[in-house]
Image: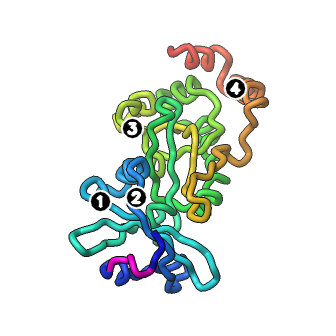
């Protein structure tokens, strides 16, 4: 719906700002798609009740941005969040959506921008390797060896594991009794494109990680290095669950 005469007065009063904090002009609005609302609720629980609208606005330089607002009678409240990495303001439509291999049709939303995610992926592969090279405890070392090579994006804060799968990605520290979260790689990532009014797929691969074709050979070589450091019998025992 784009006819300016049909824009409700309460919607006209909303302050629509660009990422550079510039005033934006309302271009169109529509009821938020139910399938998208269900995903957004995972990060914006205020969308779980009532109705919501998607509002497209244009900045002075022509960039489009989509906002989401809840409706209360004749009034509208913008739904806003904050990037967990950069702390910049985000609309739900700016946020990344993700799913896990165990439930590929069950999408969740993370309050993180696409730009921040691109800078973040560069450090996660080395962080995973460090967890294997300098494990906190034997339980962690054993389970990570059994899980194998992690080459896709993961983060327990950005992409928390659903309760149904947490037992597979948690171990108890042998010494302290504390729970340790293990890397749980996502299967897919996507973000809503305001200009295309459809989803764009985001690459899940970590910077520096082997490709799918190279993954098995890379992992064998990496484990062989660990065997040389810790002993073949010890590593074989951990891999077998001992």
Q: State left or right for residue 115 relative to residue 21.
A: right
- Of marks 2 and 3, which one's residue comes earlier in the chain? 2
Q: Nearer the viewer, mark 2 or mark 3?
A: 2
Please tell me how crowded label 3 is: few (under 14), some (14-19), or many (20+) other residues with Cα within 10 Å.
few
Decide if residue 88 is in sight here. Answer: no
Q: CA distance from mark 4 to mark 1?
A: 52 Å
Q: Which residue is mark 1?
A: 51
Q: State left or right for residue 154 relative to residue 129.
A: left
Decide if residue 43 is in sight here. Answer: yes
Q: Which residue is mark 2?
A: 32
Q: Are marks 3 and 4 in contact (CB under 8 Å)?
A: no
Residue 213: x and y in percent read 78, 29
Q: Which residue is mark 4?
A: 223
7 magenta-colored: yes
Q: Are marks 1 and 2 in contact (CB under 8 Å)?
A: yes
Q: State left or right for residue 72 relative to residue 41.
A: left
Q: Which residue is mark 3?
A: 162
Element under disc 2: loop
Q: Are marks 4 and 1 in contact (CB under 8 Å)?
A: no
- Of marks 1 and 2, which one's residue comes earlier in the chain? 2
Main SS category, magenta section: helix
Q: Nearer the viewer, mark 4 or mark 1?
A: 1
Q: CA distance from mark 1 to mark 3?
A: 26 Å
Q: Which residues are magenta?
A: 4-8
Picture quarter with the N terminus: bottom left
Element under disc 3: loop
Element under disc 4: helix
């Amino acid at each position: 719906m784009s006819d300016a005469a049909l824009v409700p007065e309460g919607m006209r009063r909303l302050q629509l700002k660009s990422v550079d904090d510039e005033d934006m002009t309302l271009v169109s609005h529509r009821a938020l798609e139910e399938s998208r609302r269900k995903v957004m609720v995972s990060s914006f629980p205020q969308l779980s009740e009532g109705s919501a609208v998607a509002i497209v606005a244009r900045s002075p330089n022509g960039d489009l941005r989509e906002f989401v607002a809840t409706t209360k009678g004749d009034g509208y409240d913008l739904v806003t969040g904050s990037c967990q990495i950069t702390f910049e303001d985000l609309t739900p439509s700016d946020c990344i959506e993700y799913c896990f291999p165990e439930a590929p049709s069950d999408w969740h939303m993370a309050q993180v921008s696409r730009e921040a995610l691109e800078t973040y992926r560069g450090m996660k592969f080395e962080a995973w390797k460090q967890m294997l090279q300098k494990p906190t405890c034997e339980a962690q070392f054993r389970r990570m060896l059994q899980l194998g090579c992690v080459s896709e994006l993961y983060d327990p804060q950005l992409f928390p594991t659903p309760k149904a799968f947490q037992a597979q990605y948690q171990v108890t520290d042998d010494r302290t009794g504390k729970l340790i979260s293990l890397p749980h790689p996502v299967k897919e990532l996507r973000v809503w494109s305001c200009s295309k009014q459809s989803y764009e797929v985001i690459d899940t691969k970590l910077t520096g990680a082997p490709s799918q074709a190279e993954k098995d050979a890379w992992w064998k070589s990496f484990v062989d290095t660990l065997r040389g450091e810790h002993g073949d019998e010890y590593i074989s025992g951990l891999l077998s669950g001992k």
